[in-house]
Amino acid sequence: MSWQRVRPALGWLGARTWPLISPARPIVDMSYSHHFVDFQGSSIPTFMKKLVVTQLSPDFRKAVTLMPKVAVPVPGDGELLIRNRYVGINASDINFSSGRYDASVKPPFDIGFEGIGEVVALGLSASKNFTVGQPVAYVKSGSFAEYIVVPADIAIPVPLVNPEFLTLLISGTTAYISLKEFGYLSEGKKVLVTAAAGGTGQFAVQLAKNAKCYVVGTCSSEEKAGFLKSIGCDLPINYKSENVASVMKKKIPEGVDVVYESIGGEMFDLSVNCLATKGHLIIIGFISGYQTSSGMLPVKAGALPAMLLRKSASVHGFFLTHYMSKYKEALIALVKLYQSGKLVCEVDHGEQSQEGKFIGLESIFRAVDYMYTGKNIGKIVVELPHLVNSKL
Ligand code: NAP
Ligand code: X1H
């Protein structure tokens, strides 16, 4: 069969490449049949594997079960069936599995916040903007599955199935929007980023550097400190080998203007302590508590009013889903920075983990452990390989 270059829908991220799709394979209307052949000539199976929360617990292994045989979902009108090629791991996967996100939801329910892959089938009206074979990314719960149905109006056309784009969907936009809304960044400001070498921390560091700030970043190893240096962090602090409070007091006695805080507990207390007059602390998360039954760890909250008042400082919570009106602009700006070589999107595929690269849904359990033992550098991404079964 001959292959033809067809023009993909020009999504809002633009398109740099022309994917090959089979001209003989128009839109697949999955409601008539449940046996298809996709754009690469391999069959879309009737069944697939997916992860399901079967019991509420912040212990991911206890909460989540790999279902070996569930029906591949069928896209309705205005929907896309996407074959996931990479899915992102988020610290909050265990908040989701513990039911903290929505107390009214009872197991079983799907899990995983984001993915990138290609469209393999689509409902009729989705064909206005999408085509079979097109690379797309999305943020939607249920991504820890081989296939997922996503409404076309939330799917993000991407130039190619590149895991680096995945790092921007949640981790990048969280840093971009929170710092833009509450960081008040400008040249010479001093910024402290905790979990700086992680999925979202890496973007906070680079965006603050882009704004010509002086950036301090905390992390747990020398290798991470080296990575932080490589992305422009002025002062990486390995909290396992250095006393963060002493280093901060010595190097920045006047305090920092902004803290991008993800750890909680003692690190939150320390961050409040090192705020400058009129400083802003943005609460991005509190990962050190997520594995506990309440999801929290104690902080010195009793002293907080006095500490903030004394410094005219502020503490601001930030949750990405409350800022969807800013999302599109943020993602476009991040992709532009990435494509112009001004933003590193570090992906951790788990090569350094005990059992090697995170490949297949089974490896998501290992990937979550890897994050919670503080091993990752950059965003943890799990690859879901697709063995092309071409009959052509
Ligand atoms: P990540 O930073 O890629 O990984 C988590 C990092 O946290 C680890 O690499 C480790 O780095 C540190 N860590 C892990 N377990 C820890 C523990 N028990 N105690 C102390 N530190 C621990 O993860 P992420 O998905 O990007 O999330 C980072 C933070 O951002 C989380 O708090 C998450 O909830 C938050 N977040 C918030 C939003 C939002 O909308 N507010 C969106 C996305 C993410 P070290 O080397 O520093 O120890
Ligand atoms: C509707 O608003 C929310 C906000 C946060 C619903 C749920 C949460 C939640 O579960 C989270 C969360 C979400 C994202 C993220 O990156 C970090 C966190 S921390 C957290 C939470 C942890 C423990 C609790 O007891 C309550 C919330």
Image: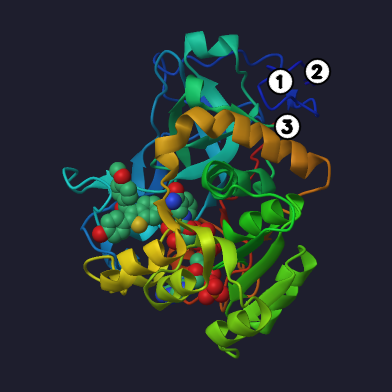
Nearer the observer: mark 3 or 2; the answer is: 3
The residue sitting at 47% across, 38% down in the picture is 147
Under tag 3, what secondary structure? loop
Under tag 2, what secondary structure? strand
Camera-nearest residue between 161 and 316: 316
Q: Residue 218: x percent and y percent?
A: 59, 74
Q: Circle 3 is placed at which residue position?
A: 159
In the rendered image, which quarter is residue 119 located in?
top right
Lower sequence index among marks 3 and 1 = 1
Quadrant housing the N terminus: top right
The residue sitting at 71% across, 20% down in the picture is 22
Q: Residue 189: x percent and y percent?
A: 67, 58
Under tag 1, what secondary structure? loop
Q: Is residue 375 above or below residue 215?
A: below
Q: Amino acid at mark 3?
A: Pro
Lower sequence index among marks 3 and 2 = 2
Q: Residues within 10 Å of mark 1 (few under 14, many from 20)?
A: some
Q: Residue 33: x percent and y percent?
A: 42, 18
Mark 1 touching mark 2, by CB under 8 A?
yes
Left or right: where 93 falls relative to 174: left
Camera-nearest residue between 18 and 389: 18
Nearer the observer: mark 3 or 1; the answer is: 3
Lower sequence index among marks 1 and 2 = 2
Camera-nearest residue between 20 and 40: 20
Q: Is residue 335 visible?
A: yes
Marks 3 and 2, how far apart at CA? 18 Å
Q: Circle 2 is placed at which residue position?
A: 4
Q: Circle 1 is placed at which residue position?
A: 22
